[in-house]
Image (cartoon, rainbow, N blue to C red):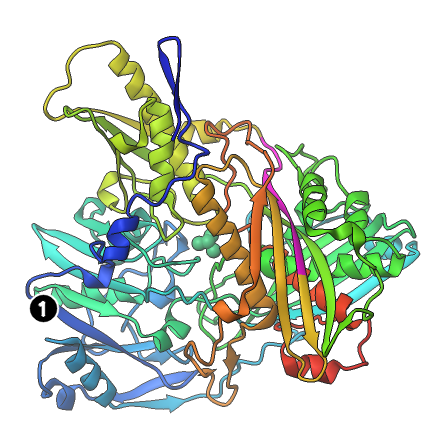
Amino acid sequence: MTTTTTGTVPVTGAVGTAHTRVEGRDKVTGAARYAAEVPLAGLAHGWLVVSTIARGRIRALDPAPVRAMPGVLAVLHHGNAQPLESDYVGPMGPADPALQLFQHDRVPYAGWPVALVVAETSEQAREAAEALVVEYDEEPHDVAFAAGRPEAYVPAGNPRSPAEQGKGDLAAGLAASAVVVDEEYTTPEEHHHPMEPHTATAYWENGRLEVIDANQGSAYVAQELARLFALDPSAVRVRSEHVGGGFGSKGARAPQVAAAMAATVLHRPVRVVLTRRQMFSLTGYRSPTIQRVRLGADPDGRLRALDHEGLNQTSTVHEFVERSADVARAMYDAEAHHTVSRVLRLDVPTPTWMRAPGEAPGSFALECALDELAERCGLDPIAVRARNEPEVGPLSGLPYSSRRLLTCFEEGARRFGWADRDPRPGVRREGRWLLGTGTAAASFPTLAGPSTAAVTAEADGGYTVRITAADIGTGARTALALVAADALEVAPDRIRVRIGDSDFGQAMLAGGSAGTRSWAWAVTLAARALREQLALGGTIPPQGITVRSDTAEALAALPPRERHAFGAQFAEVAVDVATGEVRVRRMLGIFAAGRIVNPLTARSQLVGGMIWGLSMALHEEAVRDERWGGHVGADLAGYHVAANADVPLVEADWVDDPDEQDPVGIKGIGEVGIVGAAAAVANAVWHATGVRHRHLPIRPDRVLTAGAGDRG
Ligand code: MOS
């Protein structure tokens, strides 16, 4: 932290200076309590029972034997559960049927909650839950995700961003192109699996439903619960102080609803913690995708035609669209431009947002296709991207707020040593390893959601910020302390940031890479107004002086722009020709992603995203057993996430790119780090071996069986 004095006005430079997490010491000493660790008198423990069939009805569920087991307090199921509201549009859209716990006897997918067993201890609840016998009338199910199925449809989308969008004559554009790429790319089902499992504790106090939760937005969860239980919004309070990762999965889920139902019945606090296995069916996931990309270009690489068609799966009960084709709308222009994301309904759980939803799988297909185009044109992959740099949004016609993609490529190429690269594939050998390098572009929308904040000048000279933000491990709490410090023109150690309490009012959730931007905006407005008020003089009363802000008006007044963060990804891989193993040797990402509030935690966010990309490229794949509809190896042994031994030197850095219209200059960095990372790895594998891998993950068996065939 540096503070300089210009005349009489102290100018603090907290924003932009590396700062360790303000709660870091509490976390490493265990003083910080995660949701399942908060002690409560009289706490009972709930254990969910989930279906073992993918489609059908519950024929029989007899709770009596289980009720007689030691410590068991209640068994909630469709025969005794209280009715929930289902006819509403909540903060996240139409009521999610997955939150309608125990309301009927139908089973729409494997892993559907059919009962909650509550006992004095977690162990007793688990033993009883495992002893509960549920009989089903099974019906034929369909979990086969495949291209070309006639039931796939184009979803309605929303008016500002339809699922299908285009311009120009695609067939003519492709016919007039000297070079055409027409390939199918697939990505598997992937799961968030934050370190901290989903958990919630509910109890009633003074006529209010209190929930201690692990979520990405306590205001949203509180509003959803108020709707579900037909309560006045002021009668629900949700707190989520420390969160061990979310990645899109930690919204309103079964644990909050189950805990609230049980607390209502038992008149005591009830805690529900999901098992790792239950998280595979109860917390959302990234849908598998099948994508077709067609690129038509002149010999110099200039695009004439671009077609990106994505397909994802959703459940039979709720629609979720993985918008994998959207990324092309921001990235590249062509006279003929068509993008569509289609959906197929199956007897599977509803997928959800997962780190860079749409962009992560979409950029794999699009950025691999660009690499294939470069190869066929005999051009450098960066040159092809430079040739197709649009002046304005390809479909919107709007100017970019800023687009420093080529600066990222220039800086990245320089630091990675790209200039020395021999473009020929399959010619670098080091013992049994073939070596290659690859690159890809990244982008992610810059968003913001209306937020309120309160900043209090305390009588002791400190300041307290209150905002319903969520720090899901990103360092958001620390970032907000730095932002408040600069807006108040005081040192960060005088700021106390309180987050994760729905009583603090409406605020954006930690999602869409928009949390810190949205909250910093609200904190800045309140802090500046407070500073002006304090400048008028006078003493601070014991209760302090509080100023509140609301960003709704400021956001509505933003001029329309193409707002995105950008980045250039680079990877070097080694491929073992004997075993098919792919090792990433190094990765470099250079980003243009707005003003960086805290370089320490920002680097961690970007590197983390890149590691997810590596993991997506080489490891992650949830395999569904079509015979019963659930997963094979539903644990972190069967579902491998890149671990230390998989991850080499990963460097992330950025170029200066403050957002002109944001009061702090922020764009958002939560998700852009994963975008393009898997494509950079796949493109490097091609460069190493001469073989295109269009299906993720690039497993050893795929490398071996691809062999000399499927050469791109
Ligand atoms: Mo993120 S997938 O927008 O929580």
In the picture provided, is 328 more to the left or to the right than 540? right
- Percent position (x, y) of residue 551? 39, 30
Residue appearing at x 49%, y 84% in the figure:
141
How crowded pointer 1 is (Cα within 10 Å; few <14, some 14-19, many 20+) is rated as some
Residue displayed at 8% across by 64% down:
268
Residue 360 placement (x, y as % from top left): 58, 58
> Would you say 545 lies left or right of 149 here?
left
Compared with residue 192, is residue 142 higher up or lower down, i.e. above or below? below
Specify the quadrant of the image occupied by residue 552.
Answer: top left
Occupied quadrant, residue 615: bottom right
- Quadrant location of the N terminus in the rendered image: top left
Q: Quadrant of residue 340?
A: bottom right
Give the farthest residue toward the front: 431
| Residue 496 in the image: above or below residue 609 | above
Question: Which three-letter amino acid code belongs to the residue tagged 1?
Answer: Leu
| 595 is higher (above) or lower (below) than 692 | above
Q: Main secondary structure of the magenta part?
A: strand
Q: Which residue is mark 1?
A: 266
Q: Where does the magenta region start and end?
A: 560-571
